[in-house]
Every structure is written in C-alpha cells, then in structure tokens.
Image (spheres, rainbow, N blue to C red):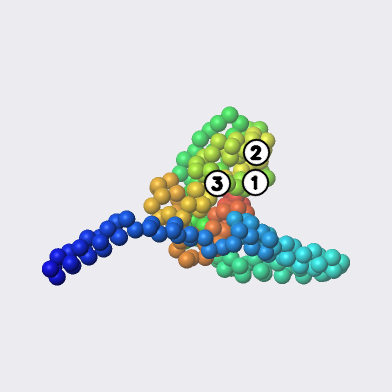
Amino acid sequence: MLLHRFGWLHVLFMSCLLVGVAPAEESFEVLPAKIDGVPKHQMMRHYLHGLANRQFEIWRAEYNVRKSPDEIVKYQKNLKAKFHNGIGGLPAKTPLNAKTTSKASRAGYTVENVLFESQPRHYVSAGLFLPDSRNFQPPYPGVLVVCGHSAEGKNYEKYQKAAALLALNGIAALIVDPIHQLRAIARYDWPARCRTKHLWTTGVRHGPCRLPDDAGAPANIDLLRDTRLL
C-alpha cells in the first residue's frame, strides 16, 4: 500500500513538471530608454561629442587670447611637443639603403620601383615617377603622394594617375605603400598582400612605426632628396 501511494505521488510530480506554467521571458535590458535625455543607442556618440565640444571651447578660448607672433610660435611649439609625446616620439634617422628593383618607360615619364628601409629592416615599397628629361631638365620639384585605405596600396588606379599627372607636368612624385593595406582590420592572418603585420592588437604604440613610411614622413622626403634629381 505504501509503495502504491508513493507511485501516485511520483506520477503527480512528473505531471507538474510537464504541464507546469512556463516561466516569464527574461529581459536582458540593463539600460533605461534614455540616459540624460539621450536615447540609449546614441549614448556613446553623445558622450564623445561632449568631450570634443569641451576641447573645442578650450581651444577657442586660448585662440582668442593669442595676439602676438611670439604667442603663436609658443603655441605651435607646445602643440608639436604634445603631438610627439602622444605618438611616443620620432624615430631616429637611419640609412635608407634604397635600391631600384625595376624601371618602366612610359610616354612622357618613367617609373622606378624602389625599396628602402625607413628603419633598420623595416622595408618600404614605393614608386618613383620621374618626368622625361627630354621635356624637363632636373632638378625637379617633388611631391609625396599619400595612399589611403585601398587594398591595392600604391597600385590603386587613382593614385597612379595622380603620380603620372605630376610627372607629365615636370614634377617628380613618390608614392609609398602604407605600413599595411586594409589597416582597419586587426588580424594577424590577413592575406600576404599586407606589407607588415598589424599592430593594433599587439599593444605596441604604432605611431613611431608608421611615421617613417606614412604621410609626410621624414624617410620619404629624404628618399626624394637623395634621388639627386630634385
């Protein structure tokens, strides 16, 4: 009799588990609909704009009190020092060890594929577009053509056209591959077309590494100067 009674209890318990009331759906919302009157999906945008606006107001106040050339020069020096400190300082100048790997003659100009070291064993690939010496006599003025985010780097058609147009008009143009193509992607396993490993995820301050061969870099300008044609 006792076993029979407990058997019914077991059946009743299992029935409650199977037919019981389903729990209410759990909400994972942790933020209110608005924060300081701003929709939650715009919270970070609002915060960053606030930081930028405060810095802009500080800049405006300091700008309005600078009246003399000496004050302007002092401001420029302080700004330059802050920039250098922010990127970890400028790298020391080292031998470029530049070499031309190939040349191509085109109508009105020539192209030299150049490889140089902006820092020891940090190799930079570049294209040097030179005017035809029969149309323009050296020394030539020089322009550094800076690449953007194209996957092709310096081989992107519009960059090539810009450099060619300069050479056709008597201006030497040096177009340099960025330190890596598709720089927004922080992966070590990206295809080999990226010239160097990505630095975003390594914890390395990459400013000094990029300066020698990116926009306005001293090494690029030094290379232009060392062509002896400018």
Classify the position of the N terminus by image quarter. bottom left
Disc nearer the start of the sequence (2/1): 1
* Residue 226 visible in image: no
x 18%, y 67%: residue: 6
Secondary structure category for the residue under label 3: loop
Please tell me which residue lies in front, 143 or 99: 143
Secondary structure category for the residue under label 1: strand
What is the crowding at mark 3: few (fewer than 14 residues within 10 Å), some, or many (at least 20)? few
Percent x, y of residue 126: 52, 46
Disc nearer the start of the sequence (3/1): 1
Percent x, y of residue 35: 64, 63
Three-letter amino acid code at the position of disc 1: Val
Secondary structure category for the residue under label 2: helix
CB under 8 Å between discs 2 and 1: yes
Disc nearer the start of the sequence (3/2): 3
Can you tell which quarter of the image residue 26 is in? bottom left
Three-letter amino acid code at the position of disc 2: Leu
Residue for badge 3: 149
Percent x, y of residue 95: 51, 60
Q: CA distance from mark 3 to mark 1?
A: 19 Å
Residue for badge 2: 166
CB under 8 Å between discs 3 and 2: no
Three-letter amino acid code at the position of disc 3: His
CB under 8 Å between discs 3 and 1: no
Circle on res. 143: 1
